Image (spheres, grey):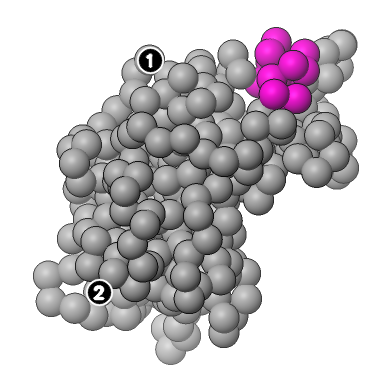
Amino acid sequence: MNWSTDEHNTPPKLKGKQPGFKRFFTKEMIATMEKTELFQKHLKPDVLKGEVFPAIRRGEMHFYHKGGCLYKFIGKDLKFEKRHKNYHKYSKGTEGMTCDYEIAKKQCENRYFTGERQLMDKLNRHTFSSERTKIVVLDVEVCLHCKTYGDRKCDLVLLNVEDPNLPKIMFVEGKIFKDSRVNVKVNFAPVVIEQVDRYTMAINEQAVEIVFEYINHIHIINTIFGTNFESPFPASLYNFNVFGFDAFVSNHLIPKAKLLVYETPEQPNINGKHSINMINKELNKEPGENNVMWVAKGNEPTLAEIWEALCK
């Protein structure tokens, strides 16, 4: 995609809309971050090896490893902020380490050593590495604002780069089957149903903004990490009124959030069967659609398999 951004790396303001979903990182922020030893010596090499995943925010860049946030580059302060202050509680195995960066990585690994975060973290490694696949993780821990329910975080955003003329964006929430929000007793409703429905509501409230901001996101990561992801919009489309984009956006953004459930038992008990049936019924209301993928314990589907199962 050939288009130049202004000083703030943001597309022109959309008429009639006030975006609640923003992705920007200025040229000044990029230049300052790239000069730091932490970025040059540690973060960027690990991003390119698939060990660390960068996520663009509102004037910030967050770096994730093994399910946790290592560091945040805070644009307004032009400096890195250390990982969460409570990570020192998870320092087992760091004895004798002298590199703060390696300590941070070990603490993230310890903090999220079980659960869906570790499993989903493995999906991130192909986005920037030389082993890039046709489906990649575009974003993680994505805050979606819903007018009714406020901010909620969705685990993954996937990008289909197989067809450069028609990329697709998909939001995916990951869970472990034993999670109490998934597996409930008979006569109770799994909370994850409402959670995924809220994501879908938020996606549809700001569909145009999401696609536009991910154009910006793609341009920024291409600039910093040397990737060549295609954007769904040619530059000329920015000159159109935003309300003319609805049909086009619907071809590029999958409007329903998806649910990926790991470690599903092959022979669930009565509560498990109730939970599976209710989730399938409530999240697959339209004929032919599939918004839930049940993954058997011990299995780890590829990004292509996840996309194929959930793109319907």
Residue 284 — which label? 2
Q: Does residue 170 appear to the left or right of 34 in the view shown?
A: left
x and y, in percent, of residue 114 in the image: 58, 42
> Is 68 or 238 nearer to us in this picture?
238
Residue at the extreme left of the image, as rendered: 288
User: Does the segment drawn in magenta span residue 36?
Assistant: yes
State whether residue 47 appears in this view. yes
Residue at image point 69% right, 24% down = 31
| SS for dot 1 | loop
User: Does the segment drawn in magenta span residue 62?
Assistant: no
Amino acid under disc 2? Asn
- Crowding at label 2, few (<14), some or many (≥20) Cα neighbours within 10 Å? some
> Is 43 or 163 nearer to us in this picture?
163
x and y, in percent, of residue 119 in the image: 47, 39
Q: Is residue 299 above or below residue 95?
A: below
State whether residue 263 appears in this view. no
Instruction: Please provide the residue range marked out in magenta.
Output: 31-43
x and y, in percent, of residue 163 in the image: 18, 38
Amino acid under disc 1? Ser
Which residue is the site of mark 1? 130
x and y, in percent, of residue 312 in the image: 18, 60
Q: Does residue 264 appear to the left or right of 13 in the view shown?
A: left
Residue at image point 30% right, 44% down = 234
Q: Is residue 118 above or below residue 294?
A: above
- Crowding at label 1, few (<14), some or many (≥20) Cα neighbours within 10 Å? few
Q: Which of marks 2 and 1 is nearer the N terminus?
A: 1
| SS for dot 2 | loop
